[in-house]
Image (cartoon, coloured by chain):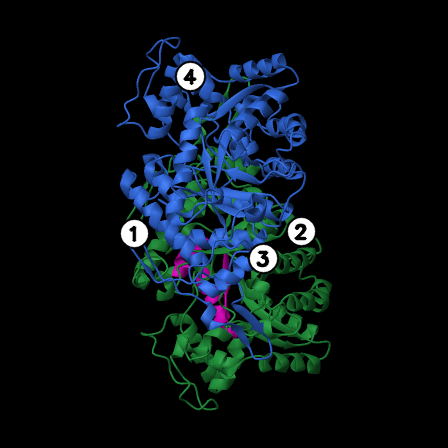
Chain colours: A green, B blue
Amino acid sequence: MSKKQMKLGLSMRYMGYHVGSWRHPDVPADGASLFQSFLEVAQTAERAKFDMLFLADGIGVRLDDKPKGSMCRSRHNVELEPLTLLSALAPLTRNIGLVATASTTYNEPYHIARKYGSLDQISGGRAAWNVVTSWSDQEAWNFSMSKQLDYDTRYERAHEFVEVVTGLWDSWDEDAFLLDKESGVFYDEKKMHVLDHVGKHFSVRGPLSVRRSPQGRPILVQAGVSEPGQQIAAEYCDIVFMAKNDLKSAQDYYSSVKDRLEHFGRKKSDLLMMLGLTPIVGRTREEAQEKYEQLEALIDPIVGLSMLYRSFGDLSHLPMDGPVPKPDLDKVGLKSSAQMYYDLAQKQGLTIRQLYKKIGMAQEHKTVVGTAADVVDEMESWFEQGAADGFNITPSLLPHGINDFVELVLPKLRRRGRFRDEYEGRTLRENLGLPVPASRYATTASADRRLAS
Amino acid sequence: MSKKQMKLGLSMRYMGYHVGSWRHPDVPADGASLFQSFLEVAQTAERAKFDMLFLADGIGVRLDDKPKGSMCRSRHNVELEPLTLLSALAPLTRNIGLVATASTTYNEPYHIARKYGSLDQISGGRAAWNVVTSWSDQEAWNFSMSKQLDYDTRYERAHEFVEVVTGLWDSWDEDAFLLDKESGVFYDEKKMHVLDHVGKHFSVRGPLSVRRSPQGRPILVQAGVSEPGQQIAAEYCDIVFMAKNDLKSAQDYYSSVKDRLEHFGRKKSDLLMMLGLTPIVGRTREEAQEKYEQLEALIDPIVGLSMLYRSFGDLSHLPMDGPVPKPDLDKVGLKSSAQMYYDLAQKQGLTIRQLYKKIGMAQEHKTVVGTAADVVDEMESWFEQGAADGFNITPSLLPHGINDFVELVLPKLRRRGRFRDEYEGRTLRENLGLPVPASRYATTASADRRLAS
């Protein structure tokens, strides 16, 4: 019997998750603004048969110059926008999925349904939406708001937003368009559905001006660890991105999400849990360690402290080689990161300097430093122990990180039967092995026909 | 001395402006949803050295089934969304401009500045935004509004929207990014500008998370004939799209817009007036007339009446071969079209049937039926008499219409020295021969340097 295989995604934002990646000699310093950089990375990932490309997002330039001098040293300033970038990559790729992040707090559901629907048409069924609620006042200030919506309202709005978007995606049955040149009838009125949504946050009539997705509907992704985030994932999503550093908490989270699926009439296999993973690979462990140290040296201390700022406030008055203080969770922007960073520091006994170096390497993602065999061992171990269905590779540097992974790690993963040699299907949903959700307007009879076919 | 040359654009929406284009044997009936259809058209236009591709837009599916049975016979239902489509075309083209429509009524300026800024980076300076205010309640219903904003508010909002977007596009000086790997300094703080806009409709802090446009800023297009529309055009825009059927009214409008430029410190040559033109070309006049009649036959009377509905209300109880009644301008959706259609009917003594056939051919755009010489004569005549700086070709059918135009009309236009053999520049702005607007933060000294270079 063939072994169960892993799914693999590649995170491309800023051409590498290392905070100083742009300073590395092999990285184009302005790569985040260059289409050509992303194209090369995307084509490498597709040749390697990755399931998907992923772009995280935030909408704005953060102007916290804390500590002073850190802002102009950060590369988090300019970049290409995810939907335009993935649309441009669509016709130059054939099989790989295209996952773009968009916020439910600063968008309108009709636009999101339409743009992702359109990308899905253009790409032949490879579009995915990573649903986020955003988390900072700095974004609110770009959208005529004095501060962000409170937490509960953000998630309540997100839930309704996803309900509307998925509803709009059901506007047209697959066979709605008769296109009968002779009689002049373009579509069958019985196969067009008017949403007429009226809710607390949105009133949206529909129908959507994009035809039904080649994959039933675009893939939905969620990354929030909060209770309401998990609920949205269980009810609607196909994929959850997770950032976990220890096996036990990954297993707990994995089960927590999967256990919720049954309530919505879904099977555990209907949703894939993808763990963020940053491999620093060498031909020997020594070479990997050298690479790691070279990367550490690229982290300017002031930039390191600025990364801790949003979780801990200003730590520049404390000894860098002293302990990490407990964050004030009521005051910080992104609670979940603050808690995770603090737990990490406690567990591993990290100093402030050690913590920012760790985060600077790959943000909150699990890092493995070692040979290809070390990396594959670790991946297989987490995969087998119910902590992940696959991995979202978050390389420190691009294109370096993906080249290394493809050259060194993938052959071993394949040799162990854990990753595909060829794409199985045409759409992202087919390649992920996920079921096509029935239209909310499908009758039982037609749903049965679909299942039988 | 070489003759002054025309600019040429190609409108691609729905694969042809003829209301029944999809019924024509040569047209892919579902072409508006097929990326490949647009790609072929775009590449033909680029080989022919067209200045730009244009996509009009509306956000929703209109559900007026008036007269009954017309709705399911209309092709205005599903299509690809302009920004995703043009982004996908960007890497498969090299020189041609990419003009996408977006509404100021149902968008946020930060998103628009960012997405068009990103498309501009991806395309190497070929992005353009056609600024519209939208005009129907049917769109409002998709955006949690019970009816559209009133006319004055729409234009007031549009004006402020454009002010914010152009401000955001000045967020970074061209040379802001030092990218100094050694010192770790990414950008020069003095060359980043925080907009801090606080106005009646928007509060937007900025800066934009996209670097400065390769063409200074994306090209701005306006098509509104109203007083406030002309003001926005004169203050901010590079191009005006116009729909006029008689020379005199085109000349008046041309002067009206151009005369406003001086007030904003701009020259008449700083803005280009582009006339919508639908050529029905044959090798002989008879062949052209035959094509025209073949096209007329594709217009289902019920679809014809539905096109008049939004200007005149339901005319199905009136004799089709009788006169066109005066529209009630206070009640109709799009006042300017209603007035234009009525004037056209009056001037040419058209019956209801004749009017819908005329509109069905190319909406409100000027139509020329004849040989290539006839078309070129007409174009040259309007161009020389101060009615247009160029033409936005609105073909009845695609790809047929552009193939015909390129094969038959363009060689004659070139022989008369009226159209380019090769692109002059790299960006859309360079090819249009338009000046780069100075950043609002430019000092006089640096502005002088720019002009001198």
Q: In this orientation, does residue B336 appear?
A: yes
Q: Residues within 10 Å of mark 1 (few under 14, many from 20)?
A: some
Chain letter for the residue marked with disc 2 in the picture: A
* Front residue of this view, candidates A6 and A23: A23
In the image, residue B187 sits, relative to residue A273, either above or below, namely below
Q: Are marks 1 and 2 in contact (CB under 8 Å)?
A: no
Real-space Cα separation, disc 1 to disc 3, in angstroms: 37 Å
Q: Give the extent of the magenta segment.
A: A229-257
Q: Residues within 10 Å of mark 4 (few under 14, many from 20)?
A: many
Real-space Cα separation, disc 4 to disc 1, in angstroms: 40 Å
Q: What amino acid is labelled 1 in the image? A: His
The x, y position of residue B376, in whole percent, is: 60, 25
Where disc 1 sits, the SS reads loop
N-terminal of the pair, mark 4 or mark 1, is 1
Where disc 4 sits, the SS reads helix
Residue A53 — which label? 3
Chain letter for the residue marked with disc 4 in the picture: B
Q: Quadrant of the C terminus of chain B?
A: bottom right
Residue B355 — which label? 4
Real-space Cα separation, disc 1 to disc 2, in angstroms: 49 Å
Chain letter for the residue marked with disc 1 in the picture: B
Q: Which residue is mark 2?
A: A423
Q: What amino acid is labelled 2 in the image? A: Tyr
Q: What amino acid is labelled 3 in the image? A: Leu
Mark nearer the viewer, 4 or 2: 4
- The main secondary structure of the magenta stretch is helix
Q: Which residue is mark 1?
A: B201
Residue B429 — which label? none
Real-space Cα separation, disc 4 to disc 2, in angstroms: 54 Å
B165 sits to left or right of B284: left
The x, y position of residue B369, in whole percent, is: 56, 18
Mark nearer the viewer, 3 or 2: 3
